[in-house]
């Protein structure tokens, strides 16, 4: 199922339910039928998500080193990392913070 995040400051962001649940969990929210991230919660949410992206990138760099050491015929494709999944959502969070508006879903 798709979850659509809405803000008057940014285009809608849609993602699969499990990805939305994961990203919301990082910022301390739970995915329900309806929800809101208030503009007062945005600075902490952005900081938590950026910290998680930074940590994930560090882990990815470690995996890249291991992958590069493997023989070429056994290399697997690069998985989509947190940075790629979170990017549109982070843009929405930042734009909403600038506009001091809330983000809602399930409406």
Image: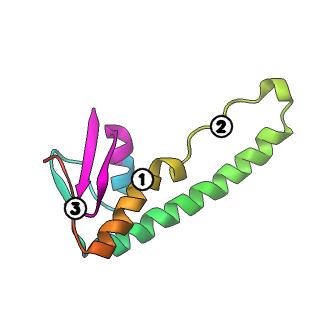
At numbered mark 3, what does the secondary structure look like: helix, strand or loop?
loop
Q: Residue at x 38, y 55 (%)?
A: 89
For label 1, count other residues whose C-alpha is less than 10 Å away and answer few (under 14), some (14-19) or many (20+).
some
Q: Earlier in the sequence, mark 1 or mark 3?
A: 3
At numbered mark 1, what does the secondary structure look like: helix, strand or loop?
helix
Q: Which residue is mark 2?
A: 78
Residue 97 forms part of the magenta stretch: no
Residue 50: percent from left, percent from top: 49, 65
Q: Which residues are magenta?
A: 1-21
Residue 9 forms part of the magenta stretch: yes
Measured Cα–Cα span from mark 2 to mark 3:
34 Å
Pick whichever, 88 or 65, lies toward us: 88
Residue 14: percent from left, percent from top: 32, 43
The total number of labels drawn is 3
Q: Residue at x 33, y 75 (%)?
A: 98
Q: Which residue is mark 1?
A: 88
Residue 41: percent from left, percent from top: 28, 72
Horizontal side of residue 37 vs 81, given as left or right: left
Q: Which residue is mark 3?
A: 8
Quadrant for the N terminus in the image: top left
């Amino acid at each position: 199922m798709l979850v659509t995040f809405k803000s008057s400051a940014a285009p809608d962001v849609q993602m699969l339910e499990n990805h939305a649940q994961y990203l919301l969990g990082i910022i301390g929210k739970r995915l329900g039928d309806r929800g809101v991230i208030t503009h007062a919660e945005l600075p902490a949410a952005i900081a938590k998500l950026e910290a998680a992206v930074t940590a994930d990138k560090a882990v990815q760099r470690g995996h890249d080193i291991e992958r590069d050491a493997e023989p070429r015929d056994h290399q697997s494709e690069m998985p989509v990392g947190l940075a790629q999944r979170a990017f549109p959502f982070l843009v929405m969070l930042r734009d909403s913070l600038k506009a001091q508006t809330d983000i809602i879903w399930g409406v």
